[in-house]
Amino acid sequence: MNTLLLDKEYYKFKDQELNVIITKKNITIEIDGNVKINDLESKEDINLNILVKDNSRLIYNKFNKNLSNSNVKIDINNNTDVSFNQSVYNELEGNFKIDANILGNDNNTIINYYGVTNQKGKLVVDATGNVIKDIKNNNMLENVRILALNEEENIILPNLLVSSNEVSINHNATLSSINEDYLFYLESKGLTKEEAINLIYRGFITSKLDIDQELKDNLLD
């Protein structure tokens, strides 16, 4: 699959599966129909707006390494399925904001954010799910998890703004370090401590990305 360089402010994708690299700081992407986007090589700080039209299906896989600022806003209309999966590896301080706005009826939305910090890295993640009033039959899950390989402080700010009674919305947020029992088990199988740590955090950071194993294996090389 070829990779498309996104260097303009606005794009519309309809019934496509594509790999992209975003070089424009402020960009809007409109989704129409069934679309899958793999955004695995973008290296610049970003303000990304995603507009999901009625009756659309979106899978957006996003991987970033050492970003300082990332702002993502997703506007979701009627009868959609949206899965936004962002994985981040940071060795510096990063501020990440994800806003998912449910504006219509009959939507299923999943937001996965999996971050790993190492060396001087730390993350502040502000995740907001917003459901406006007078809409119905909506389901949303925000799943934010950070794995620290260092001693820096990470922060998760979960916000749920719900103005409708006919909605199922949940938010999971966890901050953790490497499980010593996992390390002990892997070392007992002959891995060095460094190899075991690499295996654990690579599996963690790629677990929600809907991409093939070869792409996962190459992300952190």
Image (cartoon, rainbow, N blue to C red):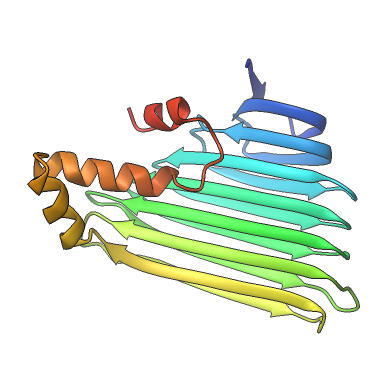
- Identified at 63% across, 49% down, the residue is 84
- Identified at 51% across, 30% down, the residue is 212
Is residue 7 visible from the viewing direction of this image?
no
* Relative horizontal placement of residue 192, taking residue 168 as reference (left or right): left
- In the rendered view, would you say 101 is above or below 25? below
- In the rendered view, would you say 13 is above or below 88? above
* Relative horizontal placement of residue 125, taking residue 200 as reference (left or right): right
Q: Quadrant of the image for the N terminus? A: top right
Is residue 110 visible from the viewing direction of this image?
yes
- Pick whichever, 77 or 136, lies toward us: 136
Q: Position of residue 49 (x, y in %)?
A: 72, 48
Q: Position of residue 45 (x, y in %)?
A: 52, 42
Residue lying farthest to the front in this orientation: 189
Q: Quadrant of the image for the C terminus? A: top left
Q: Position of residue 190 (x, y in %)?
A: 8, 39
- Pick whichever, 148 or 107, lies toward us: 107
- Identified at 43% across, 43% down, the residue is 206
